[in-house]
Image: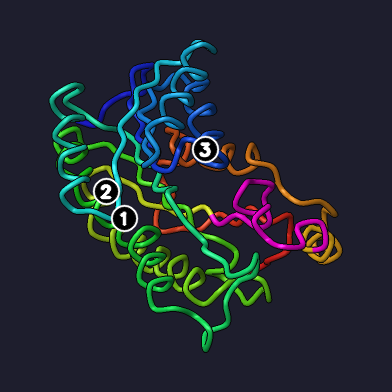
Amino acid sequence: MAQTHDATRIALITGANQGIGYAVAQRLAADGMRVLVNGRRVDALTEAVRTLTAAGAEAFAFPADVSSEAAVSAMFDQISARFGRLDVVVNNAGIAPRIGGRSARVEDTPFEYWERTLAVNLTGAFLVSRAALALMKPARWGRIINMSSQSGRMYTGFGSAYYAASKAGLIGFSRVLAGEVGEHGITVNCVSPGRIKTAMAASFADETGVDQQYIVRTPVRRVGHTGDVAAAVSFLASEAASFITGSVIDVTGGFFMP
């Protein structure tokens, strides 16, 4: 029998010490969930948990490099021992390395940029999702939400090939996984943000100029906020989204319309 919704759902958000991940942790905590926040920087993660807890959330830090199979396995051993369950996973951890504040062209891309970006953005989601299934399947209920990107949906002129490949790969991965686990009461979906005001977005050399180029091509005439993305994640993590799987929700203000 599938679980019924209650206030004790447990959600793991990777890359949750800042930006979109932190906003998602805030939103899911406001939805009544316990939030397990993951990141590599222990100091930033500790501060995020402190701030969330001060605001009334049940928040717990789980530092780990999601691109490491051993680190993910150890993290899930801790989650299983402490909570014995996991209901929601948000694979948000992601990087977009730049050269001189700009995305590298393919011919100028160092191999380590390609390798590391796919390791964190794509392999990390695979490792975390695979580990989560062992906790979700017995409960016959689960939500896996993968953070893709507008760059994985279209050519924007701003994203690098290594970043776009990692985010497009997440969509293909999510669809196959959705097909495999739906019978177990687990849904798998993607959220695909457009230009969102975050520290990563600000890493462009000409942040204001990039913002303006997005705004003139966006029907709602603004860039997005982290709360816009968190709202989409909140919906997909809810009971209301139980008949949605293998889908992509584009949070782009209309910049991308499939």
Mark 1: amino acid: Gly
Residue sitting farthest toward the front: 100
**Residue 62 relative to residue 137: left or right:** right
Nearer to us of marks 3 and 1 is: 1
Residue sitting farthest toward the bottom: 107
Distance between mark 3 and mark 1 Cα atoms:
23 Å
Residue that carries the numbered disc 2 in the rendered image: 128
Are the two marked residues, 1 and 2, in contact with CB atoms closer than 8 angstroms? yes
Mark 3 neighbour density, 10 Å: few (under 14) some (14–19) many (20 or more)? few
Nearer to us of marks 3 and 2 is: 2
**Residue 122 relative to residue 69: left or right:** right
Mark 2: amino acid: Val
Query: Mark 1 falls on what kind of element?
Result: helix
Residue 163 place in picture, x, y as percent: 50, 68
Query: Mark 2 falls on what kind of element?
Result: helix
- Quadrant housing the C terminus: bottom right
**Residue 39 relative to residue 147: left or right:** left
Query: Mark 3 falls on what kind of element?
Result: helix
Q: Quadrant of residue 242?
A: top left
Q: Residue at x 64, y 46 (%)?
A: 198
**Residue 170 relative to residue 96: left or right:** left
| Nearer to us in this view, 234 or 43 | 43
* Residue 124, label in figure: 1
- What is the magenta range? 192-209
Q: Is residue 160 above or below residue 93?
A: below
| Nearer to us in this view, 178 or 112 | 112
Residue that carries the numbered disc 3 in the rendered image: 235
Residue 215 place in picture, x, y as percent: 82, 59
Mark positioned earlier in the residue sequence (3 or 2): 2
